[in-house]
Amino acid sequence: MDNRARNDFDAIGAEIGGHGTTAGGDNARPLPSGAKAGPDGLSRRRFLQAGSLALAMAGVGSLMACAPAKAADGESAPEEEGAGVAEASTGSGEIPVVTPQTITDDPYFAAPPAITDVAETADYDVVVVGAGISGCCAALAAAENGARVGVLSKTPSPYSQGILFAAINVPEILAESDRPEPVDVEALKAEYLELSSYNVNIPLFSRFFEVNPEAALWLYREAEEAGLMSRSNGQAVMYLDQAGVLSQNLATKAEGLGATFYHGTPGVQLVQDGGGAVTGVVGQKDDGSYIQLNAAKGVVLATGCYGANAQLKARWCPQTIHFDNYQAGDNNTGDGHMMGIWAGACMQQWPHAKKVDPHLSVTDGGLRWNNWNDPYLAVNDRGERFMKEDCLGTYRPNGTYYCPESHVNLVFDSETEHGDQAELDNLIDLGFAFKGATLEELGTAIGWDASATATFAQTVARYNDLCASGDDVDFYKDAPYLIPIQTGPFYAVRIEYMIGALLGGLCVNEQCQVLDIGQVPIEGLYAVGNTMGGLQGSTDYQWHDYGFSLGAASTFGYWVGKTLASS
């Protein structure tokens, strides 16, 4: 990709960096404004965050053996980390191992008995499990194309997170953006695959580029019809009302076309015939009774990720064990993944990609500090520096692997640019930021003991020496970002890292049909959104500036719904 295409996304990365999104600019690398590198650091210490396009996604590599089984009841609920994980033999009997490939020996993944006491049944052409953005797109597209649609929804209303949706080279959207030049799609694909180490389900990846222009334009027009606000950077659309509001509008329109949504009724079991084909889903109502939705054309799993399921995290995304889950109500317990496994489906090889987002605390309700991505000195609760602070925002949470906590304290002095002072003062009042006339007072305000505060003072002294030399021999921060901390009052803002999404799921083919361990499609079963694997498989989700997560979810949701209805 040429530099012009890259630069097109710099500005939007800065604009959306302050949103708690599923696909939003969090990979922005801060750049200095009006600064010159050297021993004196930046001229008057000005930070300016800007987005940079980081293209990295991965998918299915080698494949995983999953337990073929019939459908089962009961939701998959998170358990204590490490509980119930059985050791499996390598085959030689010498060295027991536990890997994702050995779930057939793990009782956690054993299918429970099939549900037989169904109190109610209903017949549909297409049954969707999940009412997030991918599920609502599937439901509406199917209904618009004449299908009878039933939707099982775990939440009391449609629910989704995020703001930015991929819309690759859509003429109507390009014409209304301030960056109307199309990108070179073939160059984009080539670079993307290389950055992903070719660990991608390439036919599925290619299908995205085939379908996305149509799907993105469909979604854009649906949002316009609903009166939702949006803006475009040329290759992605930002829906300012958030994906949750968009999902609710899509669901309302689908209901108007005859679709039935069973809210507060999670899917708990896939129904299979004697040959293993999926013919329906059993849901469980609030009163504990069961309803079975039969599907003449197909069942679409769209239950989101598994950020609240410790067992699945330990298997397929162990690097997230120490991060809290941000999904409201801990709804993302991997229900679709588990139902698929019980039906004989194969999971995408590990490690699955993680999207870990910065917040001010676990209870902040989505509140952000606008300067969260600037490369201030970062220390842990022992007062120690532990990361290269100017790395891409995507990678910053990884530094916390070596900390006893999943957050960082960003430290700066009164002469360093830190945005709106009123905003910072408000965060101090709320307990998310701290202030001290001296470094010792700052440590006390944060709540550190004397030892951590003394270590912190030593850390700052060492950091200032590195700033003066212009050479960070400790953590290799680039010279333009070496800004000394010298003039009080001193500040610290605590940034909590939490799981926004885990981006790995069931193996599918380019038709989004779920595959069994022999890579044969399970008849009647489809997966979309974060229940679907194959598009991302690296350790970190990086394609924020194109809104690929929500873009893929909506694209494949729309396409599968439309395709099934027309079958």
Image (cartoon, helix red, strand yellow):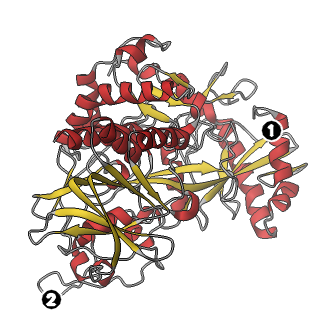
The percent position of residue 61, horizontal first and vertical second, equals 20, 53
Does residue 45 appear left or right of residue 266 in this picture? Answer: right
Indicate the position of residue 164 as horizontal and vertical percent values: 48, 34
Please report whichever mark, 1 or 2, sits nearer to the chain's N-terminal start.
2
User: Looking at the figure, which quarter contains the C terminus?
Assistant: top left
Asked whether 273 or 99 is in front, the reply is 273
Q: Residue at x 42, y 80 (%)?
A: 82
Q: Residue at x 57, y 26 (%)?
A: 229
User: Could you tell me if residue 159 is visible in this image?
Assistant: yes
Quadrant occupied by the N terminus: top left
Q: Look at the picture and state if 315 lies above or below 512.
A: below
Residue name at image x 34 percent, y 43 percent? 138
Residue kind at label 1, given as amino acid type = Glu
> How many neighbours does mark 1 have within 10 angstroms: few (below 14), some (14-19), or many (20 or more)?
few
Residue 116 place in picture, x, y as percent: 28, 80
- Report the residue marked by disc 2: 93
Is 138 on the left-hand or right-hand side of 39? left
Identify the residue at the far bottom of this view. 93
Residue 546 in view of the camera: no
* Figure check: 139 above or below 269: above
Tag of residue 146: none
Residue 563 lies, with reference to residue 344, above or below; the image says above
State the mark number for residue 423: 1
Which residue lies at the image location 25% right of the left edge and 76% below the top edge? 103
Task: Give x and y (percent) for residue 323.
Answer: 54, 62
Is 125 placed left or right of 353 in the picture?
Answer: left
Residue 29 as seen in the image, left or right of residue 484? left
212, above or below 172, in the image: below
Foreground residue, 97 or 452?
Answer: 97
The CA span between labels 1 and 2 is 61 Å
